[in-house]
Image (cartoon, grey):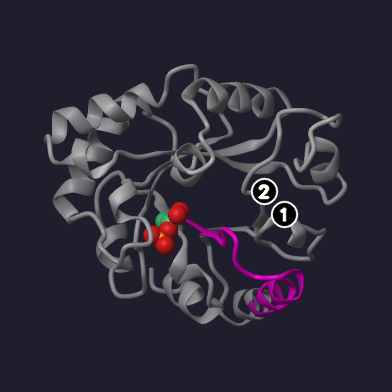
Amino acid sequence: MIFAANFKTNHTRKSTAEYIRALNDKIESSPTEHRVFVFPPATALDSYETTATIGAQNAYPAQNGAFTGEIGVEQLEEFGIDTILIGHSERRELLGESQEAVAKKFAFFKEAGFEIIYCIGEPLEVRDQGDEAVVEYLLAQFEGIDTSYGKLIVAYEPIWAIGTGRSATVAEIESTHKALRATLPATPILYGGSVKPANIVEILSIENVDGVLVGSASLDIESFYEMVASV
Ligand code: PEP
């Protein structure tokens, strides 16, 4: 299983270091076979001593250059970071990243050999139209994406379930992951959207769910590791 913590715009450099120290202590005292990822904010990226994989929440598709406010591969390489989140709905919705821009970013970081957690998810108005509309919407988010890339992990995150406390139902997750599996026969598929200690066991027991991408409930190490240790 895969457990990925997305801090978004939370935690500082200091608190991220404390978090990773606490995570290391937990891994040492209660070893896990699962893969653990942590995506801190850009200011907290560093060469941490840990068996967890530290990734970037975002970066500009360039080695370096004149891209004010952005970081590129050079700034990630400094810390040995070769994992990135691409296509998160907050970047698509709030930062206006188009499918074309997302696909361009994907192609660049694939070429650079990065492991990519690629996020897809539908808005509530699409979910309300039923399963068929959802799958059609999600498949459109693979436009320009090489779904056979060996270092790809896909995260299905219904937008209406992110940060709302309302997770998708077991039936919704099951049918969506089943449909995605047809396109992604060998790619891990994570679920994300209000995952927490109270629902982790149920979510991970769903067929074709290979792990979780967690926002709010990952910010506290006790809550995050409770989930890692629960299965
Ligand atoms: C996310 O944004 O990736 C996410 C899943 O957030 P939350 O767990 O807070 O819903």
In the displayed structure, does residue 129 sit left or right of residue 121? left
Q: Which of the two discs, 2 and 1, sits closer to the camera?
A: 1
Q: Quadrant of residue 73?
A: top right
The magenta stretch spans which residues? 1-22
Packing grade of label 1 (10 A; few <14, some 14-19, many >=20) is many
Q: Amino acid at mark 2?
A: Ala
Q: Measuring 66% from the left and 43% from the top, which residue is drawn there? A: 83
Tell me the amino acid under the disc marked 1.
Answer: Ala
Q: Which residue is mark 1?
A: 42
Q: Which mark is residue 56?
A: 2
- Mark 2–mark 1 Cα distance, whole angstroms, equals 7 Å
Residue reaching furthest to the top: 144
Give the image location of residue 11, x and y in percent: 64, 70
Task: Point out the image quarter for the C terminus.
Answer: bottom left
* SS under mark 1: helix
- The quadrant where ligand 1 appears is bottom left
Image location (x, y in percent) of residue 3: 49, 59
Compared to residue 77, the image places residue 135 above or below, namely: above
Q: Position of residue 78 (x, y in %)?
A: 88, 47
Residue nearer the viewer, 109 or 29: 109
The answer to which of 71 and 201 lies nearer the viewer is 71
Q: Is residue 192 left or right of residue 34?
A: left
Q: Is residue 91 magenta?
A: no
**Residues at circles 2 and 1 in contact by the CB criterion of under 8 Å:** yes
- Identify whether 99 is placed above or below 70: above
